[in-house]
């Protein structure tokens, strides 16, 4: 099965064409490297069986389709709460590209109300066609199967969809539900775009996710709303769900500019 990244020498990750983003074919979509950072954070975590409750990612510069290195460390270790940081750098010269900070909590079953129910499931929904603004033969859009509940890539305004991974995170290593959520979730501003892709750019400079519970299952979904401002900034808000219901939310700050 194809993968988002191929392992290189000395803990290097080599991106494949499935990470290619929509703004510049030399650069990655921010979803796959977000998942790579979460992968490093989970590997470095100390709370066995814990859960990631928040991850805040800053996109310091465009992430090129070049070999990358990821490092992770504890900022604040603990038995019930831990804070970790992961940094994505260019393998060639150490240029810092993205930084993630995450809170992980111990996990304990509590007798509380059921989660908010999800929208209609993916069964019976048609797979989405390829959006008009994506012209590369293979790119990020192909890493996932997309099924829209409402809205669509070429339909301006709020949108909700289900996705499942078409590729592994690494060869022979499928993306976990958390990693899948991050690969998908950074596209909340893409599915809910209100500006014309051919005349505007609206790239996000950050991606922050708060989770009420861990996502689960093959299919995950999101509901996105984008609100542009008249001073060159915008905000996208997202809600995430799985087959059992709501799992969390996201926010993205967008830099708006004419092409």
Image (cartoon, rainbow, N blue to C red):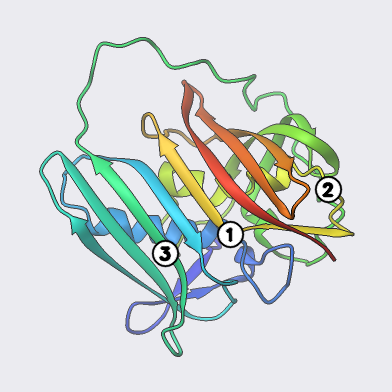
Direction bottom: furthest residue: 93
Q: Is residue 193 above or below residue 95?
A: above
Direction from residue 257 to residue 207 in the image, left or right: left
Give the mark, 3 or 2, whose residue is nearer the N terminus.
3
Residue 183: % across, % down:
54, 51
Where residue 215 sits, quadrant-wise, is: top left
Residue 149 marker: none
**Which residue is disc 2 drawn over?**
195
Q: How would you rate the neighbour count of disc 1 (Cα within 10 Å): few for under 14, some for 14-19, many for 20 or more?
A: some
Please name the residue shown 43% across and 51% down the image.
56
Above or below, comparing residue 135 to residue 180 in the picture: below
- Which one is earlier in the sequence, the residue at label 3 or at label 1? 3
Q: In this figure, which residue is indicated by the disc labeled 3?
A: 99
Between the residue at mark 3 and the residue at mark 1, the CA separation in whole angstroms equals: 11 Å
Residue bearing mark 1 = 205
Q: Residue furthest front?
A: 231
* Local crowd size for mark 2, using a 10 Å CA cut-off: few (<14), some (14–19), many (≥20): some
């Amino acid at each position: 099965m194809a993968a988002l990244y191929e392992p290189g020498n000395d803990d290097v990750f080599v991106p494949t064409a499935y990470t290619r983003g929509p703004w510049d074919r030399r650069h990655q979509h921010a979803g796959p490297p977000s998942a790579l950072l979460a992968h490093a954070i989970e590997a470095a975590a100390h709370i066995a069986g814990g859960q990631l409750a928040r991850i805040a990612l800053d996109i310091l510069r465009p992430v090129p389709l070049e070999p990358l290195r990821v490092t992770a460390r504890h900022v604040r270790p603990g038995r019930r709460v831990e804070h970790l940081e992961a940094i994505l750098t260019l393998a060639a010269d150490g240029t810092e590209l993205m930084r993630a900070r995450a809170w992980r909590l111990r996990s304990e079953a509590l007798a509380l109300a059921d989660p908010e129910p999800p929208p209609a499931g993916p069964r019976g929904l048609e797979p989405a066609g390829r959006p008009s603004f994506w012209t590369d033969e293979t790119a990020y859009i192909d890493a996932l199967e997309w099924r829209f509940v409402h809205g669509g890539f070429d339909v301006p305004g709020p949108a909700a969809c289900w996705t499942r991974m078409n590729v592994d995170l690494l060869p022979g290593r499928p993306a976990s539900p958390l990693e899948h959520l991050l690969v998908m979730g950074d596209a909340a501003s893409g599915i809910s775009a209100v500006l014309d892709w051919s005349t505007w750019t609206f790239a996000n400079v950050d991606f922050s996710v708060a989770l009420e519970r861990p996502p689960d299952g093959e299919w995950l979904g999101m509901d996105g709303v984008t609100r542009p401002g008249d001073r060159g900034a915008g905000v996208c808000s997202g809600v995430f769900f799985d087959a059992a219901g709501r799992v969390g939310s996201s926010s993205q700050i967008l830099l708006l500019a004419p092409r």
